[in-house]
């Protein structure tokens, strides 16, 4: 049984650990990382780094390496990779599961403004008016959405694992850090940098959620970019444990077929 995990998330690493710790017959596990993070924490099992060359390249890799099950455990906003995974799995006739942590949901006291894209999030900032101090936690990619002259009066604290590349907002300070983050730490950031609006993607999960609590406590509005949908027809699991059960189902089927 060979399982390919499209990884780069906490959930993908957890899944690789759980599969690695399964009793014999232990599945062969390969985790594929995109290579965008400079110092990724390697999961157990085999690791490959880099792209496949689109859906056709991934389908070829699935066949060549005799992959029995594919788990898309990439970031909820990695829409292109997820679309390629769906096409490749259908082409190679390999079962596909999307491992997605649940979305965040607002609670009483939250002041959320939702946006369908980073560009819409930038528009929401303009709609708030005035000169703003923005805690921008959408990652280091596509910051050009916030670099227009309409937002030149805004100051941005950009937090990401690796340093962002231009173009990015004219008034930017970078904070290099990797989650999980604590509530006390997020409170300190909002207070020390005098933040009055937070912009984030709906990544879900607990690792980066404390900023939402800190913003609620401080009465700060949050612009939340909605995540893209999972490709139509793809099964979804919310936890690594559920993904292990899904893999085990196909592992048992493969064992029966070989007997």
Image (cartoon, rainbow, N blue to C red):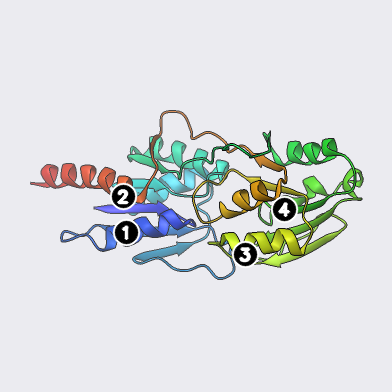
Say whether residue 65 is left or right of residue 147: left
Q: Which residue is mark 3?
A: 185
Answer with mark 3 or mark 1, whichever residue precedes in sequence.
Answer: 1
Using the rendered image of the protein, determine whether residue 3 is visible from the camera's viewpoint: yes
Q: Which residue is mark 2?
A: 241
Closer to us: 168 or 156: 156
Q: CA distance from mark 2 to mark 3?
A: 29 Å
Q: Secondary structure at mark 1?
A: strand
Answer with mark 2 or mark 1, whichever residue precedes in sequence.
Answer: 1
Q: Which corner quadrant of the image does residue 16 belong to? A: bottom left
Mark number for residue 136?
4
Q: Position of residue 145 (x, y in %)?
A: 78, 45
10 Å crowding of disc 3: few (<14), some (14-19), many (20+): few
Q: Nearer the viewer, mark 2 or mark 1?
A: 2
Say whether residue 130 is left or right of residue 101: right
Answer with mark 2 or mark 4, whichever residue precedes in sequence.
Answer: 4
Taking the spot 86% from the left edge, 51% from the top edge, the residue there is 154
Mark number for residue 29?
1
Q: CA distance from mark 2 to mark 4?
A: 32 Å
10 Å crowding of disc 4: few (<14), some (14-19), many (20+): many
Q: Nearer the viewer, mark 3 or mark 4?
A: 3
Closer to us: 92 or 175: 175
Q: Are marks 2 and 1 in contact (CB under 8 Å)?
A: no
Q: Position of residue 213 (x, y in %)?
A: 60, 50
């Amino acid at each position: 049984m060979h399982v390919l995990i499209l990884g780069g998330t906490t959930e993908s690493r957890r899944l690789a650990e759980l599969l690695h710790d399964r009793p014999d017959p232990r599945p062969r596990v390969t985790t594929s990382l995109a290579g965008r993070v400079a110092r990724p924490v390697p999961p157990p099992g085999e690791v490959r780094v880099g792209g496949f060359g689109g859906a056709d390249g991934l389908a070829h890799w699935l066949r060549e390496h005799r992959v029995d099950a594919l788990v898309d455990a990439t970031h909820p906003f990695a829409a292109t990779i997820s679309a390629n995974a769906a096409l490749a799995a259908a082409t190679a006739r390999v079962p596909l599961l999307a491992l997605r942590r649940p979305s965040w949901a607002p609670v009483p006291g939250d002041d959320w403004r939702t946006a369908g894209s980073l560009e819409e999030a930038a528009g929401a900032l303009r709609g708030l008016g005035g000169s703003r101090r923005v805690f921008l936690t959408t990652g280091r990619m596509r910051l050009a959405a916030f670099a227009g002259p309409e937002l030149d009066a805004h100051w941005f604290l950009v937090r990401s694992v690796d340093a962002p590349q231009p173009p990015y907002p004219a008034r930017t300070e970078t904070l290099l850090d990797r989650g999980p983050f604590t509530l006390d730490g997020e409170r300190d950031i909002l207070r020390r940098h005098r933040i009055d609006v937070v912009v984030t993607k709906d990544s879900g999960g607990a690792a980066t959620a404390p900023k939402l609590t800190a913003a609620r406590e401080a009465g700060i509005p949050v612009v939340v970019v909605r995540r893209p949908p999972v490709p139509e027809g793809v099964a979804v699991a919310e936890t690594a444990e559920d993904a292990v059960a899904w893999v085990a189902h196909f592992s048992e089927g493969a064992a029966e077929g070989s007997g």
